Image (spheres, helix red, strand yellow):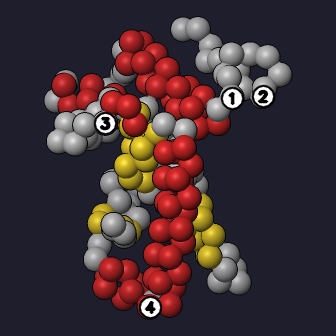
Amino acid sequence: IFTPSSKAPAGQHDENITYQDMENLIGVELSAKVKDATIDLFRFGVGHGLQRGIIIADTKFEFGLDENGKLYVMDEMLTPDSSRFWPVEKYNPGFSPPSYDKQFIRDYLESIHWDKKPPAPHLPDAVIEKTQKNYWLALRKLTQRPTEGGTDGFHSPPAR
C-alpha cells in the first residue's frame, strides 16, 4: 500500500495526504515516479529481509530533486528508525509481534502517557539498552555478519 505524506513544519509529524493531493502538489509525472520508486525499493527491502528472517512490515522513504530536477531518495531508508522490523518466527496474525525497531521506545512513551510535545522525556537506561540491542540484532540478521569486534567493520555498542 502506497501512502504519501507531506513534510510538516519542524517539530511536527508528517501529514498523510491522498495520492490526488500529491499529484496536485508535485504533478502527475513526478508522483508516478515517486510511487514506482517507493514500491521498487520496498519490494527489494522486503525480499532481502525475508531471506534473513525479518518481515519489513512498513517503511518510509523521503525523496527530493536536485537542481536539474532528477529524483533522489533522501535520508535514511529501511532502517529500524524508519521501518517496522518483525522476526518471521514470532509473527502471528492478529497479534503485535516483538520487533527490532523503535516500537520499544514508542511503547515506553505510551506507558508514561507522554503528550508528544517537546521536550521529549528522558529515556531510562534500560529502554535505551533494549532498543540498542534490538537495532544490533536487526543489523546482524540483515547483513548476516557478526557485530562483535573483529575485522568485519562492525563494532558492538559501548557498554553503558
Using the rendered image of the protein, determine whether residue 22 is visible from the camera's viewpoint.
Answer: yes
Judged from the image, the secondary structure of the residue bearing numbered disc 3 is loop
Tell me the number on the disc at residue 91.
3
Image quarter for residue 159? Answer: top right
Q: Is residue 35 above or below residue 103?
A: below
Residue most extreme to the right:
151
**Mark 4: which amino acid?**
Val
Image quarter for residue 24? Answer: bottom left
Q: Which of the marked residues, 1 or 4, is nearer the chain's N terminus? A: 4
Do the residues under discs 1 and 2 have CB atoms within 8 angstroms? yes
Q: Is residue 133 above or below residue 138?
A: above
Of 87 and 123, nearer the camera is 87
Do the residues under discs 3 and 4 have CB atoms within 8 angstroms? no
Of 138 and 24, nearer the camera is 138
Q: Mark 3 vs mark 1: give the one in front.
A: 3
Residue at the spot of label 4: 28
**Mark 3: which amino acid?**
Tyr
Judged from the image, the secondary structure of the residue bearing numbered disc 4 is helix
Of 16 and 34, nearer the camera is 34
Residue most extreme to the top:
159
How far apart in space, not on screen, are marks 2 and 3 (Cα)?
Answer: 31 Å
Q: Which of the marked residues, 3 or 1, is nearer the chain's N terminus? A: 3
Using the rendered image of the protein, determine whether residue 120 is visible from the camera's viewpoint.
Answer: no
**Mark 2: which amino acid?**
Gly
Do the residues under discs 3 and 1 have CB atoms within 8 angstroms? no
